[in-house]
Image (cartoon, helix red, strand yellow):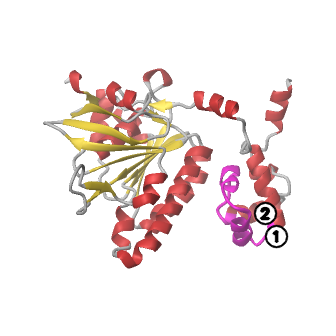
Amino acid sequence: MSGEQESEAKKPKDISELPGVGATTAEKLVQAGYATIEAIAVATPMEIAQATGIPLQTAQRIVDAARAALDIRFKTALELKKERMTIRKITTSSKALDDLLGGGIETKQITEFFGEFGTGKTQICHQLAVNVQLPDDKGGLGAKAVYIDTEGTFRWERIEQIARGLNLDPDQVMDNIYWVRAINSHHQMAIVDQLFSLMSKDNIRLVVVDSLTSHFRAEFPGRENLASRQQLLNRHLHQLLRLAEVYDAAVIVTNQVMARPDVFYGDPTAAVGGNVVAHAPGVRVQLKKSRGNKRIARVVDAPHLPEGEAVFVITEYGIRDAEEE
């Protein structure tokens, strides 16, 4: 056995194998919601100490061990480059849109689609929930999806149509999509907390939140509630980002737009959420209506992608290139 293989074999596979975690501590961690190494690694020692009642020093050792097990450490830029080269992508079923996104929807980050009603945000979410199940050579990850529905926009009928368009068994495709309706913002965040356990037990590589901000807007109206709303939204976005990074998953969020009455030139709309939402996603894509079933996608923010536009169409069988009509 090589040194690398030996090191891999010694890595803890379960929380009970972490240094300092006996049967009693493991039980406390599980009861507090820290049932996996991933859940512990992304928590702070203070959070764990408060939730379980174990000493802060012990919690620090446990968190450090979990992070070491997941290789969360300082890395050189070259190591980072090698990691980035292995990041996988999910096709959108439109080559033009894939090219705009640098090859498709990337894992380990949040991709946001924002736009007015009817611009195709939910259509893209449905398409990706199916496409993630495709094998690698077809632009998928051979994995399952979770669809967090905050506005009741998920339609199994649409999934069935998209599956047929890709010559897939619709029932099998639907069986690989976990759907949950989030009833308010706190429930929405609690669902993501649960995913830290669920994703370690199942082959889930795509998480969709459609839409990200609707509950937060409804529950925190007015300028007097803005600070509370933004603080909670910030926590939720960092929660999703940790999920994407730890499980090498793609996270898709949709967002609404609001009017900007102070803008006289250019686009008079802006994505909801202000700077908090603007800075969290790795890729932000604005969607706009064009003629008929055509839509325009524009990358407005992505450190690794040039700004640009792509045209795609929404057909009976899902997202396609405009020339395929």
Above or below residue 255? Residue 120 is above
The residue type indicated by label 2 comes to Ala
Q: Secondary structure at mark 2?
A: helix
Residue, x 22% and y 26% (percent of image)?
322
Which image quarter is the N terminus in? top right
Which residue of the protein is positioned furthest toward the front in this rendering? 265
Residue tagged by mark 1? Answer: 55
Residue, x 72% and y 35% (percent of image)?
76
Mark carried by residue 59: 2
Q: Marks 1 and 2: in contact by CB < 8 Å?
A: yes
Residue, x 14% and y 36% (percent of image)?
291
Q: CA distance from mark 2 to mark 1?
A: 6 Å
The part of the chain drawn in magenta is: 31-56
Residue, x 50% and y 61% (percent of image)?
234
The residue type indicated by label 1 comes to Pro
One can see residue 201 in this view: no
Q: Is residue 227 left or right of residue 170?
A: right
Where does residue 43 sit, x and y in percent of width and height? 67, 59
One can see residue 133 in this view: yes
Above or below residue 72? Residue 188 is below
